[in-house]
Image (cartoon, rainbow, N blue to C red):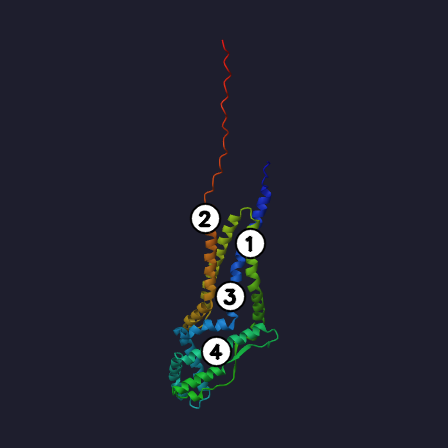
Amino acid sequence: MPLHRIDPHRTRLRNALSATLVALACLLAPCGTLAAWAAFGLADTGRYVGTMAPLAADPDVRDAVADAVGDEVVRELDAGAADSAADSAVGPFVRDAVRSFTRTEAFRVAWEAGNRAVHDAVLHALRDDAATRGPVTVDLAPVTARVRQRLAADHMPFAHRIPVEHTEVAVVPAGEVAGLRKGYHVLDAAAFWLPLAAVVLAVTGIAVAACRRRALTATGLGTALGGALLALAITIGRRLTLADLPDRLHRPAAGAVYDALTATLRTASWLLLALGLTVALASWLTTLRPRRAPAAAPTAVRAPTPSPPRART
C-alpha cells in the first residue's frame, strides 16, 4: 500500500496555530482567575464580611481602629466643649477606653456591622446604574451608638457626650463612582467569559497540534507560569499598596487586611501552578514509556529439494 507523505508546510502551520492558541489560553488563565476572584469574592457581601470578621481579633487592626475612633471621639468632645483644656486632659482616658473596647465582643459585632454597611453601600452604587451620581456614603450612627453604649457601661467619663448623629460618611468619592461602576461591569462579564475562553483555546490548541502530547506539555507549563506570575503580582501589589499609605504606623493593619482579602486569590494562584506542573509532568512521563518493538515477520522455511534418482548401471 502507498504511504501518505507528511506535508511539512501543513505541519508547521498546525504547530504555529496550536502555539498561538495555547499561549492565549495560558495568558487568559490568570486573568480569568483574577476576574473571578473580584466578581465572586469581593463582590459578595457574605464572603466579604466573613473574610473581614477574623480581623477583629488582629492586634494591629484593633490598634489602628482604636487610634482612629479615639481621635475622632476626642475631636468631637473638643468641638462641643466649653473647657477644651479639661477635655484634652481626658483624651488619654478616652483612647485607653476605646482600646479596651476593641477587645470585647461588642467590638466584634460593631466591626462586622460596619463592614457590612460599607460593603452594601459600595455594592449598591456599583450594581445600580440609576444610583445617585454623588459619592458613596454610609451612615455609621448605629456603630457609634454601640460604642457609646459600651463606654457608658464601663463608666467612662464624658461617654454620654459622644454625639450619635446620622452623618453620611463618604467611602468612595463622587468622581470615582462612574469609573468603578464600569470596571465592575467589565469584571462581572470577564469572570464568566475569560475562564471559559481559556479552556476552549487550550483544548483547541491541543487538538490542532501535530504533536498533541507536546502541546499538552506546553499548556501545562504555561498554566504553571501564569499561576507563578499571578502570585508574584499579588506580592508586588501588597508592597505597592503599603508603600502608598501616608501613615506608616497603620501599615501592619493594612497588610493584615490585604492578606485577608487576597488569601483566596493567592490559593488560586498556587492551584494553577500545581495543576500546570502536574499536567506537564504527566505528559512528559508518558513520552518516556518504552514503545513495544514491532513483531518480526515469520521467515519462511524452505523444504529441502529432493535429489534426482541415480541411474542404474
Residue 172 shows in this picture: no
Q: Which mark is residue 285?
A: 2
**Residue type, mark 3 in image:** Trp
Image spot of residue 141 (x, y percent): 49, 83
Q: Which of marks 4 and 1 is nearer the N terminus?
A: 4
Mark 1 to mark 3: distance in Å?
23 Å
Q: Residue 37 carries which label?
A: 3
Marks 3/4: CA–CA distance: 23 Å
Residue that extends furthest to the top in the rendered view of this protein: 313
Label 2 residue SS: helix
- The spot of residue 295 in percent (x, y) is 49, 37
The residue that mark 4 highlights is: 114
Quadrant including the N terminus: top right
Q: Earlier in the sequence, mark 1 or mark 2?
A: 1
Q: What residue type is labelled 4?
A: Gly
Point out the tag, 1 or 3, that comes first from the N-terminus. 3
